[in-house]
Image (cartoon, helix red, strand yellow):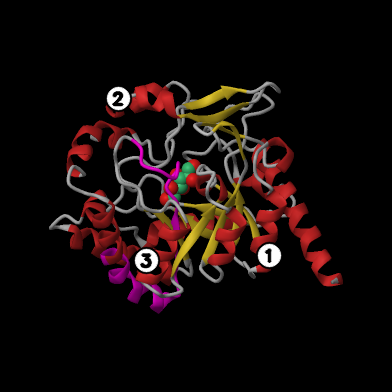
Amino acid sequence: MEMTLRWYGSEFDTVSLKQIRQIAGVTGVITTLYDVPAGEMWTREAIRKMKSEVSDAGLHISGIESVNVHEKIKIGASDRDKYIENYIKTLENLGEEGLNLVCYNFMPVFDWTRSELARSRADGSTVLAYNQEDIDKIVPEKMFESIAGDMNGTVMPGWEPERMERVKQLFEMYSDIDEEKLFANLEYFLKAIMPVCNKYDIKMAIHPDDPAWSVFGLPRIIINKKNILRMMNMVDDVHNGVTFCSGSYGTNRENDLPDMIRSLEGRIHFAHVRNLRFNSDTDFEEAAHLSADGSFDMYEIMKALYETGFDGPIRPDHGRMIWDEKAMPGYGLYDRALGASYLNGLWEAIKKNNKTI
Ligand code: DNO
């Protein structure tokens, strides 16, 4: 296991590489070319520049989050091959540069969805939160406007302004896409990219849908054990793997997180570990990483990862906004640094315990 932090690049992140370098136990970053739109090819030159910026700061790139998949691939449009070709070339360029972990998602239109970006908690921190009744009242096209004011001047992943301008059109594109079609389009995409992944040993790690159910009537498939195992079997190659995100799968309280981890042994290439606090079945907020602050047993999650031999990067996921920090909601420095230290502590204890058994 390697502890990492997500970093959006110096142009977009409020957190610097220098700060990340000073979090004890964090050796790598998870990053991306944030300004390259989905569907465009990443050049070797741009990848090299990103790599050297990170290594100049005494860190290295542990994985890419994300190389986004163009909507035409997700809906299976007649011109999808053109976008798949660009994706393959991007993977080739990443592979040539020695980068071989790629996180992506297959969520229609919206990436993650929340009803609030800054819900106040009793301790004075603010967190991202989800309330189903509030979501039901939102007109999807107005989603961006409803959250824009809480972004602290940042561009949040999945909520890029150019994507939001096209929301209505995107919804129309999905009008005849159901879960079966989405699965078939995912299979087509994976089969097309597996040869390049095998050539460069690139591990693809699909991120779950967040929340793990359909929102605004759009189909969502990466939501539970049954579906993710179906996906693993559909393209049975170790390079077709998973980002295990506790906070996303955990939105559905029927998902038994340690059990899911065990059932995916060998196919989890990347882990996002964070905690949620449920106020009811339809209302949750993002808690501190500490088990006691939320609804998950973080020890059991880390233990399941350890016991299944997980050796990829982990990152603390969304943190609370604390100590008056102004940053991209979920992606401030302070609470994620606390999260990284806590998760590192759990891991050390689990490891030492296992040695004495
Ligand atoms: C949100 C993130 C997601 C994730 C993508 C992966 O904070 O976890 O945006 O990066 O779904 O492609």
Mark 3 and mark 2 residues within 8 Å of each other at the beta carbon: no
The residue sitting at 37% across, 66% down in the picture is 91
User: In the image, residue 253 lies at what x, y percent?
Assistant: 54, 44
Label 3 to label 2: alpha-carbon separation? 36 Å
Mark 3 / mark 2, whichever is N-terminal: 3
Mark number, residue 91: 3
Mark 3 residue element: helix
Residue 2 position, x and y percent, is 65, 61
Amino acid type of the residue that numbered disc 2 sits on in the rendered structure: Val
Q: Residues within 10 Å of mark 1 (few under 14, many from 20)?
A: some
- Residue identified by numbered label 1: 306
Q: In 3D space, how far apart are the residues under numbered discs 1 and 3 (Cα atoms)?
A: 29 Å
Depth check: give the residue in front, 69 or 58: 69
> Bounds of the magenta span?
188-215
Left or right, 16 with respect to 189, comes to right
Which three-letter amino acid code belongs to the residue tagged 3?
Leu
